[in-house]
Image (spheres, helix red, strand yellow):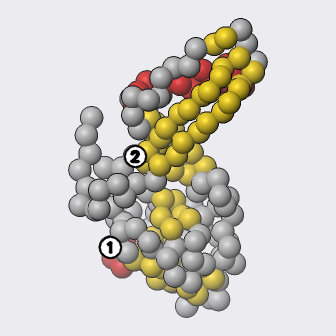
């Protein structure tokens, strides 16, 4: 397959998972995952591991205001006055893109304008819910280095899987 983007080349999240030794059920699970990825034919949703909960005080179900969203701006409705949105928080959009909040913001009335670090690739539908708790990244195998590891008894040794964010 291929993808096209108007952004700077390489503007995707990437992930490398490495293990020196996996034994028993952990080894079996990793072997199944390697087979399922099929060199990029399959996708995987990966939690944003560094922070599963936001720094800001906002909790609830904000929705996208599509008419105000685009470029590096994410416009939200259904906020609570005084809710804070903090730089570094990660949010998952219905379109599959995960965005990082670039500047602190506070909700005014029931809406809020957020600046995001990477331009929004596809504007989400108006009223779609934004996931702020446990955001995930849609990823695929990134290159041919993801070879299916060989079992040695009940062990897998020197396992490395590489992934890149999917969009398009």
Residue 124 against residue 160 in the figure, above or below: below
Please tell me whether mark 2 sits on a helix, a strand or a loop.
loop
**Which x, y percent locates residue 92?**
51, 59
Q: What residue is drawn where x is 26% and y is 45%?
A: 3
Query: Is 162 left, or right, of 121 in this rendering?
Result: right
Secondary structure of residue under mark 1: loop
Q: Is residue 71 above or below residue 143?
A: below
From the image, tell me which residue sits under label 1. Answer: 71
Residue at the image point whose x is 56% and y is 52% from the top? 136
Image side of residue 39 versus residue 133, left or right: left
| Residue situated furthest top in the rendering | 153
Q: Is residue 135 left or right of residue 22?
A: left
Which picture quadrant has residue 61? Answer: bottom right
- Nearer to us in this view, 120 or 18: 18
- Count residues near mark 2 (Cα–Cα under 10 Å), then give few for <14, some for 14-19, many for 20+: many
Identity of the residue furthest to the right in this view: 24
| Mark 1 to mark 2 CA distance (whole Å) | 19 Å
């Amino acid at each position: 397959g291929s993808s096209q983007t108007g952004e700077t080349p390489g503007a995707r999240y990437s992930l490398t998972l490495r293990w020196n030794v996996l034994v028993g059920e952990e080894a079996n699970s990793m072997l199944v995952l390697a087979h399922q990825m099929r060199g990029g034919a399959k996708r995987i949703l990966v939690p944003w591991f560094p922070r599963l909960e936001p720094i800001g005080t906002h909790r609830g179900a904000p929705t996208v205001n599509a008419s105000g969203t685009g470029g590096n701006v994410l416009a939200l409705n259904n906020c609570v006055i005084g809710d804070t949105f903090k730089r570094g928080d990660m949010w998952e959009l219905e379109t599959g893109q995960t965005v990082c909040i670039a500047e602190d913001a506070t909700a005014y009335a029931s809406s809020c304008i957020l600046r995001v670090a990477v331009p929004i690739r596809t504007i989400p539908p108006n009223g779609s819910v934004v996931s702020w708790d446990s955001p995930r990244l849609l990823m695929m195998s990134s290159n041919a280095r993801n070879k299916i590891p060989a079992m040695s008894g009940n062990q897998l040794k020197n396992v490395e899987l590489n992934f890149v964010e999917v969009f398009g």
